[in-house]
């Protein structure tokens, strides 16, 4: 499972021209589920993300987590994170998990983050054509892959 974490001053998801969800300052997270992912991958990534110290403290040092600063989280499913680009110019998504695995693990990720934050997590809509807007603060963008946890 892969996530792309972006520290944002705001972010939103629009579907069909209508605002679906939005957040203020916090984290915009793209969530990609790949074949073979498990609940352990989800739980590890959720814990890692909410405790990642990427917000400035009073000295301007990235020393605070989204929990510490009371930030919001917007989680959007993104199967293209599973892209293989080894051959040719057309990415292959053969390793992206199918709906039967991806949907429950994406939902579990959102629920785990909610539990760890103690408040709701804004979401995209799984499988929808979404327009995602964000203002990356920093910019700060971090990629975390559960296959690299050891």
Image: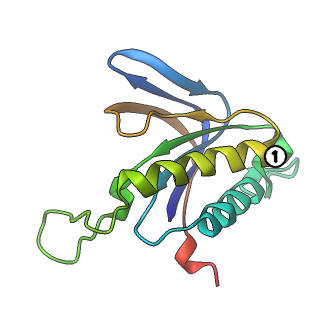
Question: At 40% from the left edge and 14% from the top edge, which residue is drawn?
Answer: 18
Q: Give residue 66's position: percent from left, percent from top.
A: 76, 46
Res 94 → quadrant: bottom left
Task: Residue at the far top: name it.
Answer: 18
Task: Tell me the element at label 1.
Answer: helix
Q: Which residue is mark 1?
A: 67
Position of residue 120 measured from the top left corner of the image (x, y, whole percent): 71, 33
Q: Which residue is at 45% across, 72% downward?
A: 36
Which residue reaches farthest bottom?
A: 150
Where residue 119 sits in the image (x, y, percent)? Answer: 78, 34
Quadrant including the C terminus: bottom right
Task: Give the image's coloring scheme.
Answer: rainbow
Q: Is residue 45 left or right of residue 123?
A: right
Relative to 2, say whether 108 is above or below. above
Residue 93 x %, y %: 26, 62
Q: Is residue 66 above or below residue 148?
A: above
Task: Classify mark 1: residues with Cα within 10 Å, few (<14), some (14-19) or many (20+).
Answer: some
> Against 46, is 146 above or below?
below
Q: Is residue 70 left or right of residue 135?
A: right
Residue appearing at x 14%, y 62% in the figure: 90
| Residue projecting furthest to the left | 88
Which sits in the foreground, 28 or 122?
A: 122
Which residue is outermost to the front? 100
Measuring 36% from the left and 30% from the top, which residue is drawn there?
131
Instruction: Tell me if 118 is positioned left or right of 147 in this view.
Output: right
């Amino acid at each position: 499972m892969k996530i792309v974490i972006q520290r944002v001053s705001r972010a939103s998801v629009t579907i069909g021209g209508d605002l679906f969800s939005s957040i203020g300052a916090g984290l915009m997270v793209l969530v990609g589920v790949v074949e073979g992912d498990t609940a352990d991958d989800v739980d590890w990534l959720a814990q890692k993300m909410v405790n990642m110290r990427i917000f400035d403290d009073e000295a301007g040092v990235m020393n605070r987590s989204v929990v510490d600063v009371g930030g919001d989280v917007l989680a959007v499913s993104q199967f293209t994170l599973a892209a293989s680009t080894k051959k040719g110019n057309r990415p292959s998504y053969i390793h992206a998990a199918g709906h039967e695995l991806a949907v429950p693990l994406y939902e579990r990720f959102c629920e785990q983050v909610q539990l760890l934050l103690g408040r709701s997590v804004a979401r995209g809509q799984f499988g929808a054509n979404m327009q995602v807007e964000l203002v990356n603060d920093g910019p700060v963008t971090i990629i975390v892959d559960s296959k690299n946890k050891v």
